[in-house]
Structures are given as structure tokens and as C-alpha cells.
Image (cartoon, grey):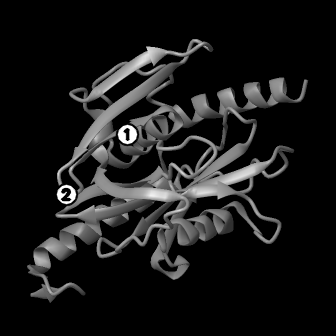
Amino acid sequence: MVVDPRGRSFSGSMAQQERSIKEKVKHVLKTYDVGNKYSDLTLPRASVLVPLLIKNEELHVLLTVRSMKLLSSRGEVCFPGGKQDLKDKSDIETALREAQEEIGLPSDQVEVICKLVPIINKDGILVTPVVAFIGDTFQPQPNADEVSDVFVLPLDYFLKSEEHSSTPYETGMLVHFFTFKDRHLHKTFTIWGLTAQLCIIVAYVALGQKPLFKVDFDIDDPFTSMEKYLMAKYATSKL
């Protein structure tokens, strides 16, 4: 019998199963680690943390809602993260610092798995996704000036079609939307844009299942599609 820090007990077989799931996910995601491949791109930098956790033998992801006190993107669902500080030594350090500042996640409780292909956002900032595992016992302590809500949902939610919709963007790309009703917070959240697309890709890679809706990138090789889009947008940004 295994007892977790909150006093719950569960069988050794469940603990073993969760460890197995975690190791399999780590193995596959590490094969997509970009390392320092894009370190020479001369754009302002930011990082987001993609926090994965296992609950009841199922892979979940943690998301936040931006505070209405912020000047931009107020009320939008996103990952913990923000702009790189001069004191940050790496993209990973930026993601960990921002997660601690925003939701009280100690960096020593984060197991970084990989960095994925960065994305250039609408403000011309190079955003690097840092995928990591956190414990299922983590209790967020949101900084009210930056975060209004923190919630967790199964990662495979981003492969299903029931609460999904999409619309073409001016660039011709699809913008994906997911509606999630959180029964614990009694709130409904809309996850869309770059956050939704990143959730789709991480879910597909980590779970090995294709989404049940149309996407506009090569689902069999999503990171090559992301790289092509990144370099095309970077070339345009330097004109």
C-alpha cells in the first residue's frame, strides 16, 4: 500500500502504472527536445511552462487564467510564463521563475523534460515552450496581480471534438477553441489560440493519438511544421 502526502492510500499497482505512464511520456517528448537550436534568433524572448501531471492514471495539464488587472490578454487562458529577464540564464530558467512568481510553483518541484520549437507571438516575441512534470499534490498559490484562476484538465481533452471549434485566421491558419467546464471551480473556460494549438500538439505526441478534428499542420510531423512556420515568420520579422 502506498500513501501520498495528502493521506490517500492506493495500491502499489496504481503507483507503478502512473510511473510507467510518466516514463513513457518523458521518453517520447525528449526526442523532440530542441536544445539550443534556436538560441541565435535575435528577437525578444519569453518562455512558458507546460506543466504535466498524472491523476488517477491519466495525463493532465495545468493552465492559468490571466488576471483582469493586467494590461494585455486579460482573462485569457494560458500557461505560466512571461518575458525573459536579464538575470535569466536560459529559456528554462525564465519558465521556472515565472511559474514560481505566478502560481507559487517551486522550481525544485519541477522535472523539466524538454524545450519544444519556439513560437513567434503576435507581438514579435519568441516564446519557448518548456514541458515539465509536476506532482499531482501541488497546490497553486496564484499571484492575484497576474493570475485569477488555476485549473487542471485531462490532456486528451485537446484531441476530442465535442467541445472543440475552429475558425480561419487572416493568415489562413486555423484558430482552435475548446470550452471546458470546471466542476470544482464552477466556472467555464475557453482555451484558444497558441495555447490551444500547443495543447493539441503535446497531447498528440504524449498520448500517441490523433485529434478528431481538422488541423492545418502536418499531424504526423507537427514540429517540422512548427519549424517551417517559425523560420518563415522570423524571416518576415527581419525585413
Residue at the limit of the structure toward the right, as seen here: 239
Residue at the limit of the structure toward the front, as seen here: 69
Locate the C terminus by quadrant.
top right
Frontmost of labels 1 and 2 is 2
Query: Is 37 above or below relative to 239?
Result: below
Query: Is 213 above or below relative to 93?
Result: above
Contact (Cβ within 8 Å) of mark 1 with mark 2: no
Query: Is 71 above or below relative to 84?
Result: above
Residue located 12% across and 74% down the image: 13
Residue 118 coordinates in the image, percent (x, y): 65, 44
Query: What kind of residue is marked 1?
Result: Tyr
Residue 138 coordinates in the image, percent (x, y): 35, 74
Residue 113 coordinates in the image, percent (x, y): 51, 63
Give the left or right position of residue 182, taking residue 194 as reference. left
Locate the N terminus by quadrant.
bottom left
Q: CA distance from mark 1 to mark 2?
A: 26 Å
Q: Is residue 40 visible?
A: yes
Query: What kind of residue is marked 2?
Result: His
Query: Camera-side residue: 180 or 158?
Result: 180
Q: Disc 1 on helix, strand or loop? A: helix
Residue located 37% across and 39% down the image: 204
Residue 32 coordinates in the image, percent (x, y): 55, 49
Residue located 52% across and 52% down the image: 31
Q: Which mark is residue 184?
A: 2
- The answer to which image quadrant residue 165 occupies is top left
Query: Camera-side residue: 76 or 54?
Result: 76
- Mark 1 and mark 2 lie on one chain; the one further toward the N terminus is 2
Q: Disc 2 on helix, strand or loop? A: loop
Give the left or right position of residue 156, taking residue 198 as reference. left
Residue under label 1, please give it: 204
Give the left or right position of residue 163, taking residue 83 as reference. left
